[in-house]
């Protein structure tokens, strides 16, 4: 079983009636719902206002893949919690970073760049093109899918060059964006997925849910060796 933890800031839902109308169960609830139907996943949720944001050491130790949505309150995330998430990723925990979480503390720590991008809130059409059809995150998708209304994110996206770019977005306003990006850090796999502005029902769309489900499976910890660093063992051949 893949032990999934969905983390949501959960502030827009409390303060903005239009967001609460789109996501009455919270963005975390909407993200959890389709994953709970997967036979190989167990799903928990945690939010910013819980003690240690619901991510005490025990919670992270028992998480295989962490999904992160945040926007208004990145600065309120305790540095020690962000550092703990980073360490768990280096040890092998998968991390799925959604939409405005491009500026979250755990993602910024793991990328080491500004993670800034260009944005426009005009509710324009987004078309996401699959550019790596053999990648497991593209399983079940068509050549492209569309989201009728989304916030625009445009290049440049100031992140290290991804190890794989699975999706590229085109927006009606003319911008393009690397929308589905993969990295490894230590033993951990990281996937950034662009869609999910809080005022649109993006996470209720089937293609979007499929990408997140595939990404959770892809990011779940592998079975690679624990590498001993520092002094090497004695020579394996006679010197
Ligand atoms: Zn947004």
Image (cartoon, rainbow, N blue to C red):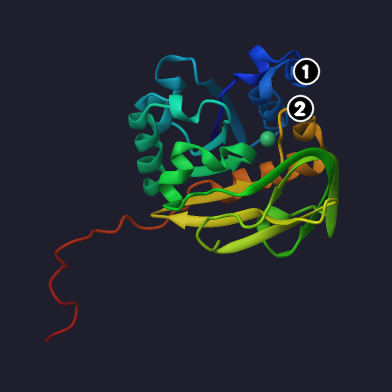
Determine crowd level at label 2: few under 14, some 14-19, many 20+ residues with C-alpha closer than 10 A: many
The location of residue 186, given as percent across then percent down, is: 38, 54
Q: Is residue 112 left or right of residue 209?
A: left
The span from disc 2 to disc 1 (Cα, nearest Å) is 7 Å
- Disc 2, SS: loop
- Disc 1, SS: helix
Residue 92: tell me if it is visible: no
The location of residue 75, given as percent across then percent down, is: 45, 29
Whether disc 2's CB lies below 8 Å from ligand 1 is answered yes
Q: Which residue is mark 1?
A: 18
Q: Which residue is mark 2?
A: 199
Locate ligand 1 by image quadrant.
top right
Query: Which residue is nearer to you in this view: 169 or 26?
Result: 169
**As drawn, 17 above or below 111:** above
Residue 166 falls in image quadrant: bottom right
- Sequence-earlier tag: 2 or 1: 1
The location of residue 207, given as percent across then percent down, is: 80, 44
């Amino acid at each position: 079983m893949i032990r999934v933890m969905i983390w949501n800031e959960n502030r827009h839902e409390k303060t903005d009636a239009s967001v609460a109308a789109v996501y009455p169960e919270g963005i975390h609830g909407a993200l959890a719902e389709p994953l709970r139907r997967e036979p190989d996943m167990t799903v928990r949720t945690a939010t910013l206002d819980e003690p240690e944001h619901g991510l005490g050491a025990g919670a992270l130790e028992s998480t295989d893949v962490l999904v992160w949505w945040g926007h208004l309150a990145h600065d309120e995330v305790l540095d020690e919690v962000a550092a703990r998430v980073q360490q768990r990723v280096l040890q092998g925990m998968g991390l799925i970073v959604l939409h405005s979480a491009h500026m979250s503390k755990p993602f910024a720590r793991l990328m080491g760049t500004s993670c800034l991008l260009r944005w426009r809130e005009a509710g324009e059409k987004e078309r996401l093109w699959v550019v790596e059809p053999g990648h497991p995150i593209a399983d079940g998708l068509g050549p492209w899918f569309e989201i009728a209304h989304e916030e625009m994110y445009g290049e440049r996206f100031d992140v290290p060059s991804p190890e794989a770019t699975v999706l590229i977005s085109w927006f009606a306003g003319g911008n393009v964006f690397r929308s589905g990006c993969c990295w490894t850090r230590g033993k951990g796999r990281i996937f950034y997925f662009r869609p999910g502005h809080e005022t649109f029902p993006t996470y209720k769309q089937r293609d979007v849910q499929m990408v997140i489900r595939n990404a959770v499976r892809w990011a779940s910890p592998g079975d690679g060796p624990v590498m001993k660093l520092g002094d090497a063992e004695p020579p394996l051949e006679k010197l």
